[in-house]
Image (cartoon, rainbow, N blue to C red):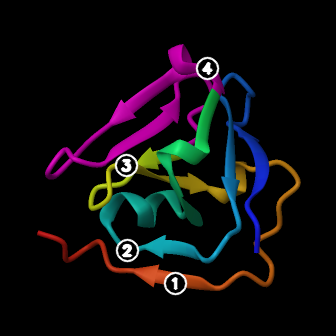
Amino acid sequence: MTDKEYSGSCHCGEVQFKILTDFPELTTCDCSICVRKNALMVKVHESKFTLIKGENFLTEYQFHTKTARHYFCKKCGIYPFHRKRVTPDYFGINVYCLDNFSPEGIRVRATIGAGMA
């Protein structure tokens, strides 16, 4: 399968980005923040992620080891993506923020984040 370009944004549209991916899988996570966000994510290398606009609308939240960097739109509060803790050169993209995308038919893997020390 070949990478395809997808556009995404927060709810209000102030934060816009694009990614390249072939969607090998989607993931959920059981850590304290991911459970509350209820996001479905795809892992994308930083070289396949482009922030088009809205850097000034992003706010960052960190907790625990302060390695992962969770980003939210300051205006609408939506979580579009985060920098991953274990692989910080990758982004976890909230696929529900992608335009014209359906996760139907893509394998979903549950990741264990709650027990990470």
Rendered image: mark on residue 109: 1
12 over 57 or under it: above or below: below
Relative depth, front residue between 21 and 106: 21
Crowding near the residue tagged with mark 2, few <14, some 14–19, many ≥20 C-alpha atoms within 10 Å: some
* Residue at 53% from the left image edge and 43% from the top image edge: 47
Residue on which disc 2 sits? 30
Crowding near the residue tagged with mark 1, few <14, some 14–19, many ≥20 C-alpha atoms within 10 Å: few
**What range is drawn magenta here?**
52-80
Residue type marked 2? Asp
* Residue at 16% from the left image edge and 52% from the top image edge: 64
- Please report contact status of discs 2 and 1: CB closer than 8 Å, yes or no: no
Relative depth, front residue between 3 and 103: 3
Query: In 3D space, how far apart are the residues under numbered discs 1 and 3 (Cα atoms)?
Result: 20 Å
The quadrant in which the C terminus is found is: bottom left
- Please report contact status of discs 3 and 2: CB closer than 8 Å, yes or no: no
Residue on which disc 3 sits? 89
Query: In 3D space, how far apart are the residues under numbered discs 3 and 2 (Cα atoms)?
Result: 21 Å
